[in-house]
Image (tube, rainbow, N blue to C red):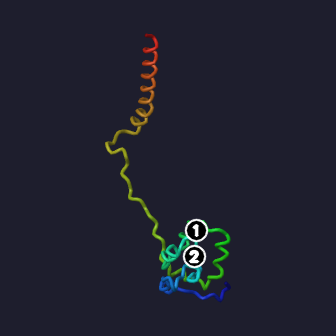
Amino acid sequence: MGSDAKVYTLAEVSAHNTPKDCWLVVNGKVYDVTKFLEDHPGGDDVLLSSTGKDATDDFEDVGHSTTARAMMDEYYIGEIDTATIPEKVKYTAPSQPHYNQDKTSEFIIKLLQFLVPLAILGLAVAVRIYTKSE
């Protein structure tokens, strides 16, 4: 795994996506996992579904053991040219309109948030006193 490691493009790695020829990209490294497909505890479908892309997130999300990570070394065949991996698109939620659509002043809203629970509490105490006196 020195500096003389072969560098592959994502297009080259993506071509290896069958049960007879399966390569994966994890943490910037390329692995030929063809011989491991039958032995993978999660089944070969899991590995095959991670071909043609950076499978690092898929790999990390599962929480592989240190033994599993050590096993990867025997399948290592080179590095990925990171310039060929498309950037992840960050999801940005659509902007939500402010909840205060009717332009009620902030002061009145704060006042009501204080007074309404206080009125409910006062009413509950009054009902309690009234029902006890009978």
Query: At 38% across and 56% down in the image, what residue appears?
Result: 95
* Image position, residue 60 (x, y; %): 58, 68
- The amino acid pointed to by label 2 is Val
Query: Which residue is under mark 2?
Result: 26
Whichever of labels 1 and 2 marks the residue nearer the N terminus, that label is 2
Q: Quadrant of residue 57?
A: bottom right
Closer to the camera in the image, 53 or 107:
53
On screen, residue 12 above or below 51:
below
Query: At 47% across and 86% down in the image, what residue appears?
Result: 15
**Alpha-carbon distance for marks 1 and 2?**
9 Å
On screen, residue 13 above or below 128:
below
Q: Residues within 10 Å of mark 1 (few under 14, many from 20)?
A: few
- The amino acid pointed to by label 1 is Glu
* Image position, residue 73 (x, y; %): 65, 80
Closer to the camera in the image, 34 or 100:
34
Q: Which quadrant holds the C terminus?
A: top left
Query: Which residue is under mark 1?
Result: 60
Closer to the camera in the image, 132 or 11:
132
